[in-house]
Amino acid sequence: MIGSNGEIPSQPHFIFYNNLTSPCGALEHTGDNLDGSGEGDDELINVTLNDISDNIKELVIVVTIHDAQARGQNFGQVLNSFVRIFDTSNDNEIAKYELDEDFSTETAIEFGRIYKKSGSWRFKAVGTGYTAGLQGFVDKFASKFL
């Protein structure tokens, strides 16, 4: 969750596998699937846009590989990776962004951003890869509470 200054306002606003719910309750990460096993979507983040605090202007959607460097893994080895946004009230898919490029050294991908513009929420696909894993995003967006 990003504020108007382009940073995460506080540590509780950084939603990930060790912090599953936002302070306002609008975001809920349902847990980490470390091996991709099982049916359906591997991981879900439930978002209620109308409940997001006014000081939050953007949601950055990042996917990382847990312990990627220690395990010698990167996104070039991951098949069928995607982020999709759907309306749970009617199960309609609103947007889907598939990772179909070769990220042979990257261990983290910024798939996209949900941002507020003129009072409404919008989605922007990004598709930028990073080799610094989760820590790289912490360093980029969370200088206040490092």
Image (tube, rainbow, N blue to C red):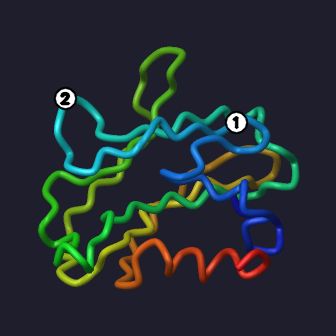
Q: Earlier in the sequence, mark 2 or mark 1?
A: 1
Screen quadrant of the C terminus = bottom right
Q: How many marks?
A: 2
Q: Secondary structure at mark 2?
A: loop
Q: Amino acid at mark 2?
A: Glu
Left-right relation of 119 to 125: right
Q: Who's the residue at 53% across and 52% down the image? A: 18
Q: Which residue is mark 1?
A: 26
Q: Which residue is mark 2?
A: 39
The residues bearing labels 2 and 1 have C-alpha atoms spaced at a distance of: 26 Å
Residue 69: x and y, percent?
Answer: 26, 80
- In the rendered image, the residue lying farthest to the right is 54
Q: Who's the residue at 37% across and 65% down the image? A: 64
Left-right relation of 16 to 23: left
Nearer to me, 125 or 73 = 73
Q: Quadrant of residue 39?
A: top left
Q: Who's the residue at 76% across and 33% down the image? A: 50
